[in-house]
Image (tube, rainbow, N blue to C red):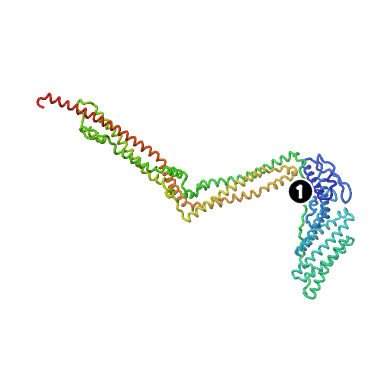
Amino acid sequence: QSAVSVPRDFEGCSTLRKYLGQLHFLQSRIPMGHGQDAAVPVTWTEIFSGKAVTHEDIKYEQACVLYNLGALHSMLGAMDKRVSEECAAGAFTYLRDHFPHSYSVDMSHQILSLNINLMLGQAQECLLEKSMLDNRKSFLVARISAQVVDYYKEACRALENSETASLLGKIQKDWKKLVQMKIYYFAAVAHLHMGKQAEEQQKFGERVIYFQSALDKLNEAIKLAKGQPETVQEALRFTMDVIGGKYNSAKKDNDFIYHEAVPALDTLQSVKGAPLVKALPVNPTDPAVTGPDIFAKLVPMAAHEASSLYSEEKAKLLRDVMAKIEAKNEVLDQFMDSMQLDPDTVDNLDMYSHIPPVLMEKCAALSVRPDTVRNLVQSMQGEAWGAWNCSLPGAGGPGGQLHSLPGLQELLGRVPPAPGSPPGLAEVSKECSKYLELHEKASFTNTELHRAMNLHLGNLRLLGGPLEQVRAALPTPSLSEDDKQVLQNLKRILAKVQEMRDQRMSLEQQLREMIQKDDITTSLVTTDRSEMKKLFEEQLKKYDQLKVYLEQNLAAQENVLKALTDANVKYAAVRKALAEVEHKWNTTVQTLVASYEAYEDLMKKSQEGKDFYTDLEGKAAKLLERARAACQASEAHRQQLLERWVGTDPDP
């Protein structure tokens, strides 16, 4: 109801557009076309004949709404200021190109072409007027005016058609006369400005012929303008004053001053029109115009099926792209594995500029224990005393003072047990041999311990000293400027490789997300089955830009890897030198850490050595006491035997 009696304003245009869109949505769901099951009679009145025309076709309703939209736009354009180049031709053009012309005579191809060119011509007039007010260049104004002439000539051809003439009746003659008058008038304006251009170029002969032609055409326009409103007559008189004055002045100047030959008009290049106006576009399903689809919940099965087909097209696109990406990624991974280049460690020069944390920890620990080295040295000296001066208290007897186990062994060797003497001396001798064996083994262990102490002592002194000395003790690479340049170039290309990877992953993710969100079910509902393939193609174009970016990324890989190969060849010598220095650096760090960790063990073993020798010394002292007693007992027994032997022998 609102579309039948719309207000004559832009709100009326909006109503017609909304109704047109909803009709389109309805048509895609309900079979209301010609000959279909739900078709209903649609009746409208022809504008020129006044006859009622009925068709059982929803498209006829759409066609009539479009016609009224174009008519309303033209009315609003006539009321508006003459400053806009947009025009009502859009609705008539869409109607001519998308609907049958057999619905009614005012929708015939000729009538619609007439309407289109009348709208375009009037819009171009507005642009012409604006160009003259803005003082545009004469040649541009001439071309714009020439295009007005072209549009009106097309309209005149449509008016001269016999079918159009019979339909319009008396109106046809009035319209034809008015259009012809405009053709002559704007041709005069075009030649006026061509004359002005010739004047600017100082082509005074051409100026005369253009102004003369403009005057002739204006006279023809004045003849055809009889019966037109006073405003038209006044405009023609004003133009005559301008063109007449220009022609008289130009002819006089040329006759008396310039004396240039006046060429024939047909020898000059014709003025080519410049079409600068645009028809208002018509998109029946534009949501910004139609508003919400009131039939949105009615999705035909065909639309679901088409949506599945579109999903398969998207999946195919993704498979094709992913196949290319995976192939390139496989080549890249294999290449990088063969290179054995880790971007994080290829440049390890920073590690040499500071002491590693593990070593700093040991230095800090020793800084709060300044007596570490001195304690170790003292421990070594105390143990050495125990090792080489394991002495026993003095003992009397035939052997004199005994100061060591070897001396005790010598005494026992000189005083063998007498026959029948107590067994103590033999036991002492046996136990002494056992202690000497233990002492010999301990001496070997002690020697090894001292060697280990001497090895770690220097490292411990280093760790306990100034940090500058520790840093100086660590190996550092010595690279030339060329070596540094080679290294920097390799790092730059490795960064390029990573950048290429990251960009590839980002583009892939964008593509997946875009495909995931891409739902054209609403568009499929309003699209004819025969147009599905075309719609798919148009919709899939939205992925073209991403595909181009991905193709560029994949194509760049070959050049990047070639550059990386060249850089790696140059890096080989630097790599070897850095590897050797890094090995020495790690070995030095490990050695220093090992020395710190060996300190506690060395101190423990040193104490165990002291305890061993102290214990051995105590045992040796007790053995010495036993040896004294055994020697005394053996000596007493010897004396008894001697006395007995002397008493029985008459001749001792």
Quick one: label 1, few (<14), some, or many (20+) residues within 10 Å?
A: some
Q: Compared with residue 605, is residue 550 higher up or lower down, i.e. above or below? A: below
Give the camera-side residue of 214 and 154. 214
**Quarter that holds the C terminus:** top left
Circle 1 sits on which residue?
Answer: 283
- What's the amino acid at mark 1? Asn
Residue 356 in the figure: left or right of residue 50: left
Position of residue 134 measured from the top left corner of the image (x, y, whole percent) = 77, 62
Q: Residue furthest top?
A: 648
Residue 562 in the figure: left or right of residue 528: left
Q: Residue furthest bottom?
A: 256
Residue at image position (69%, 40%) is 308
**Quarter that holds the N terminus:** top right
Residue at image position (77%, 55%) is 278
Position of residue 534 measured from the top left corner of the image (x, y, whole percent) = 72, 47
Give the quadrant of residue 367. Answer: top left
Secondary structure of the residue carrying numbered label 1: loop
Residue at image position (77%, 66%) is 194
Position of residue 449 measured from the top left corner of the image (x, y, whole percent) = 35, 40
Position of residue 584 measured from the top left corner of the image (x, y, whole percent) = 43, 47
Q: Compared with residue 203, is residue 441 higher up or lower down, i.e. above or below? A: above
Give the quadrant of residue 517. Answer: top right
